[in-house]
Image: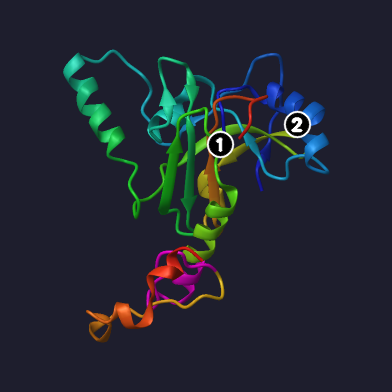
């Protein structure tokens, strides 16, 4: 299901789906935005969609969370490779 | 998902994890350079520049049913995560007619919430069931 990436020398990055491009903002606007961001994670609410590059079964692919609708997903974060999980 | 690049993920899987798990890691190892996704999920530690041990159970509708976040030195209980997923799957299959009390695991009794259960939980569920 995930789309395979064409990997060159640059390190591929992903991001949050639907997030506006970063631009100059006043401090007040930033703090409002942070509040909105924090309020997004709640049980019973939709998980924010994202696209992220991934290593999967020997290939480099792009994974979009919403492609997994219809399945149970366990999303795990960890501090870094070569540590325990 | 971690802030490591997919190239580091490949090295970790190919040279270490594949020695611990036959065939290597069976799910996508996601890269979140800059912690942008981790920030939205509330698990990115800006001071350390890494992501904490966050774990999110997302149902087939894309809804977060549960999460757990630990600081880096303590590892997770994988069996408890699996138990929670089994419980959420059971509740979903019952279309909300059943609930899983404390200590529930597959095969154990569920509760049927409704007017008849109010004040009667003590009759159908014993405290020891939370610990067995």
Crowd class of label 1 (few under 14; some 14 to 19; many from 20; radius 10 Å): few
Q: Residue at x 83, y 35 (%)?
A: B19
Of pointers 2 and 1, the one earlier in the residue sequence? 2
Q: Residue at x 51, y 66 (%)?
A: B132
Question: Where, by quadrant of the figure, is residue B130 drawn?
Answer: bottom left
Identify residue for label 2: B13
The answer to whether residue B117 of the structure is visible from this angle is yes
Q: Specify start and end residues of the magenta stretch as a single range.
A: B89-105
Within the magenta stretch, is there residue A29?
Answer: no
Q: Are marks 2 and 1 in contact (CB under 8 Å)?
A: no
In this view, the mark in front (2 or 1):
1
- Considering the numbered disc 2 on the image, is that residue within a helix, a strand or a loop? helix
Left or right of B26 on screen, residue A13 = left
Percent position of residue A28, x then y: 16, 19
Residue at the far front in the pictured view: B128
Identify residue for label 1: B75
- Considering the numbered disc 1 on the image, is that residue within a helix, a strand or a loop? loop
Whole-number angstrom distance, CA of label 2 to CA of label 1: 19 Å
| The N terminus of chain B - image quarter | top right
- Between B128 and A9, the one nearer to me in the picture: B128
Left or right of A84 on screen, residue B24 = right
Left or right of B76 on screen, residue A59 = right
């Amino acid at each position: 299901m995930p789309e395979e990436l064409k990997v060159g020398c640059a390190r591929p990055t992903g991001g949050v789906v639907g997030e506006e491009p970063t631009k100059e903002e006043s401090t007040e606007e930033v703090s409002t935005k942070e509040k909105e961001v924090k309020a997004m994670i709640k049980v019973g609410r939709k998980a924010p969609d994202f696209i992220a590059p991934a290593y999967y079964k020997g290939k480099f692919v792009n994974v979009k969370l919403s492609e997994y609708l219809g399945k149970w997903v366990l999303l795990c974060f960890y501090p870094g490779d070569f540590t325990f999980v | 998902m971690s802030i490591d690049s997919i190239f580091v993920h490949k090295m970790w899987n190919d040279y270490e994890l594949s020695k611990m798990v036959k065939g290597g890691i069976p799910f996508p190892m996601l890269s979140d350079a800059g912690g942008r996704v981790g920030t939205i999920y509330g698990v990115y530690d800006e001071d350390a520049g890494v992501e904490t041990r966050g774990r999110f159970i997302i149902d087939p509708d894309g809804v977060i049913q549960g999460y757990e976040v630990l600081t880096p030195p303590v590892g997770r209980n994988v069996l408890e995560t699996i138990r929670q997923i089994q419980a959420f799957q059971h509740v979903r299959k019952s279309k909300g007619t059943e609930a899983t009390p404390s200590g529930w695991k597959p095969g154990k009794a569920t509760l049927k919430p409704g007017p008849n259960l109010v004040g009667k939980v003590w009759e159908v569920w014993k405290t020891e069931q939370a610990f067995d």
